[in-house]
Amino acid sequence: MTAYIGRRLLHAIPLTLGILTLVFVLVQLAPGDPAALYIQPNVAPEVIEQMRENWGLDQPIHIQYFQWMKSFVTGDFGYSLAQHRPVTAILADRIPNTLILSGTALLIIFALGIALGIIQAVRQHSALDNVLTFGSLFIYSMPSFWLALMLILIFSSKLHTVGWWPDWLTFPPSGITSSVGYESLGFWGKLADRLHHLVLPSIALGVSSAAAVARYMRSSMLEVIRQDYIRTARAKGLPERAVILKHALKNALLPIITLFGLYLPFLLSGAVLVETVFAWPGMGKTIVDAIYARDYPVVMATSFLFAVMVVVGNLIADVLYAVIDPRIRYD
Amino acid sequence: MARVGLEALTAGPASWRRRVVAGLALALAAGCGAPAAERSVVIAVSSDVGILLPAAELTTLDAAIGNLLYLGLNSARWNDGAIEYRADEMSLADSWTPESDSTVLVYHLKPDAVWSDGVPITARDVVFSYELIRAPGVASRYASFWAELDSVVARGQHDVAFHFRRPHPRMLLHSGLSIMPAHIFEGTPANTDALAGHRSLSAPDARPVVSGPFLVRERRPGERLVLEPNRRSVAGRPWLERVVFRVQPDPATRVIALESGRVDVIDPVPLARAGELAAAPDIRVETTGLRYYEYIAWNGRRFAPFREPTVRRALSLAIDRPGVLAGLGIEEFASPAAGPATPLFPELIDPAVRPDPFLPDSARALLRAAGWRDSDGDDVLDRDGVPFQFVLVTQADNERRRAAAEIIQAQLAAIGVATRLRALERNALLDLVYNRKDFEAALVGWGVTLEPDYLADQFWPADAQYNITGYRSVALDSLVPRARSARTDEEARPRWRAVGVQIARDRPYAFLWFYTEAVALRERVQNVRIDVYGVYQNLHRWRLEPAAPATTSRQTTGDGER
């Protein structure tokens, strides 16, 4: 297995460099100019030219490419052209925020999705199954930004005015922490404040994908619980709980692991619409802002991270297959 | 198939589950109780603040906050339709005196003015600041202050002389730069990245050394900027103890946050929602003045018919400006434009110059006179076999401009002019229109500076940087330098009026409308001066009314702003 992982990682190096080269070319081909930030009547054209020179954008494209690649492989991600900060500092700011949000959303996606899928499978064709199917499809077809706005409208704005509604079930519409008073809280208070701010964005980000996972899980579980070994387990007199959670679940999870691998890059990429609506300073918004501003170093660094996450996500999924299914072995 | 009881899956020891649920509820309950801070305001802004250094600031918000952190030698104020420069609490100088043939201004610094780290503010800081904005690597928007400036010379500790090449009306503006601390930035390479990376600006716990009434207490890029009083400032102690600028890019969330009382001010308000917000209890909407205009630039370099003044006039007459504004629902916040001079400065507008009326029949007649006919019956005019058809580019992420372009497209179609719309993302649009000038027609906009005349030569002369249409007028090429050479405002005004008349007559653009930006505030925020200088100019004098006793709506605790 170790040799297999090593081999996969070695193969990932040219793949990642290829992806980066492609992104570099695409970024350069896109219309626009990072110096467009300086298009103002009181900024002289010479000043704009000077900025392009400072950034090395006056060099031929192949020179820019090799200079950039050289810095990159030595771990220097460069300076953001729009934020005038080292790209590593920007990533260090944004990655934790995104990990917190996407991690919680991922938890919701799989915990809720798997639980609902199991319930629907074991209660197939029941009223509960039908209600959950309708609910899942309804939520799945809802755009995340719209769901986000609805959550804000209900849980931040409307319920706020209902006298009997408990305070702790109204949630802030945006931000990571309270704007005022946060710093005077103790450790647990700060943690709770952060959790309180995390509720709506993670639900907005997670529930529609959870609905999709529930559909996959339902069909996978239905397939498994019809197998002979499940019948055997029941015939042995095992409690139904053990049959489902111990014998059926493990096998039904195989297709879900594929999904998990595909969702891993999402841990870092964030979600631009939800981040925008909830003013959550994460990677999704950073990337989109960087693309709009033609902030090449930030675009390249984030693309690199995503490429790595895709490769690692697929690798983890493959390794998990072997862990869960003893029939799968990698030589 | 065997049915499995749901209870079988959910049964089992419940104590751990109850503990988790109770723990979560407790945590959330605790989280919604961030202690309130009196004398705090939360302002939701649409974008993050840039570099907290006046030399490198780029946006209006950067400049507004820069003015609160760094004082200038004089303080400018909008006074009944005119700009007034004063030596007051928000200025570093307590007076200034002209010298010799009025080409020298000598400022006398307040002897008790100190930086927030206790170091005295001296003439050396002034000289340093002016050298900084001149450095090419800084690419400062204030570099143009040097256009008429010869030198800035320290005379001892507290006097500094500005030597201008000639007397001109903008001497006070050009000597009013926000002053930066020399003892902090001397030795740092004069380029934007190096300055932005200075420890005093970029460290996680950075506390920039400032002179204004506020200090930076905390900065979280992309999230918030928190200001607190600077006890050492000559501006005096602000009433507010805490000002939080919170980045909330989504306009709908900003509005909800204001309506639910979680923020005190939202800046800006989407104009289409301003009326609805103004009707809400405890909220007021205020405007900052008609400082922005939108126009269609007719690029004669790319579409030959636009070189003809008759054609440009006909197109302008085919646009129903009040109708478009009504269609956009912003007629309260905008006014049809006659030319590039803002109605804020009526003395710069010749009364004879009026916005073009909506006269589609006259437009058709003018085009007919210019040889345009619908000879093939396709409802599109043509001349010499060439249809009158062009591409109008505009900004994809600006809903108002996109909608305006669609309405104007229909109005032009009514006179037989076919327009294809192309919406581009902002950066690509700026590059296309202002760098490459490779477009046929563009619906774009500018903000006007508060001295709307002094940058006029960037737009109208044939070789001007932002002459994006290829417009050329021999008369204007002499009128602009003549107006620029005026020594006083009184001398300059009639000359600028003549420039305005010429531009209005030639119509290189279809000037559409001037519009204002709007902000919404909760009624409890008092003593706010809002005008063309923006919302935050007297932030140090803002006050909060005591909270009214809770009635139907509870005090916000979820976000801890109260």
Image: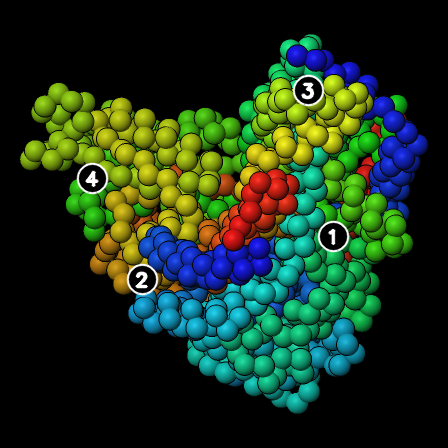
Give me the C-alpha separation between circle 4 and circle 1.
53 Å
For the point 32% across and 26% down, which residue is it? B410
Q: Tell me where residue B361 sits by quadrant.
A: top left
Residue position marked by numbered label 3 in the rendering:
A231
Q: Is residue B410 above or below residue A279?
A: above
Q: Chain of mark 2?
A: B
Q: Could you tell me which quadrant the C terminus of chain B lies in?
A: top right
Three-letter amino acid code at disc 3? Arg
Q: Residues within 10 Å of mark 4 (few under 14, many from 20)?
A: some
Residue picked out by circle 4: B310
Of circles 1 and 3, which is in front? 3
| Amino acid at circle 1 | Val
Relative to A243, A76 lies left or right? left
Do circles 4 and 3 both sit on a common chain? no
Looking at the picture, tell me which residue is in the foreground, B103 or A134.
A134
Circles 4 and 3 in contact, beta carbons < 8 Å: no
| Element on which disc 4 rests | helix
Instruction: Please tell me the numbered disc located at residue B244.
Output: 1
Q: Pointer 3: residues within 10 angstroms few (<14), some, or many (20+)?
A: some
Q: Calculate the distance from the C-alpha at mark 1 to the C-alpha at mark 2.
A: 41 Å
Left or right, B448 with reference to B175 = left
Circle 2 SS class: loop
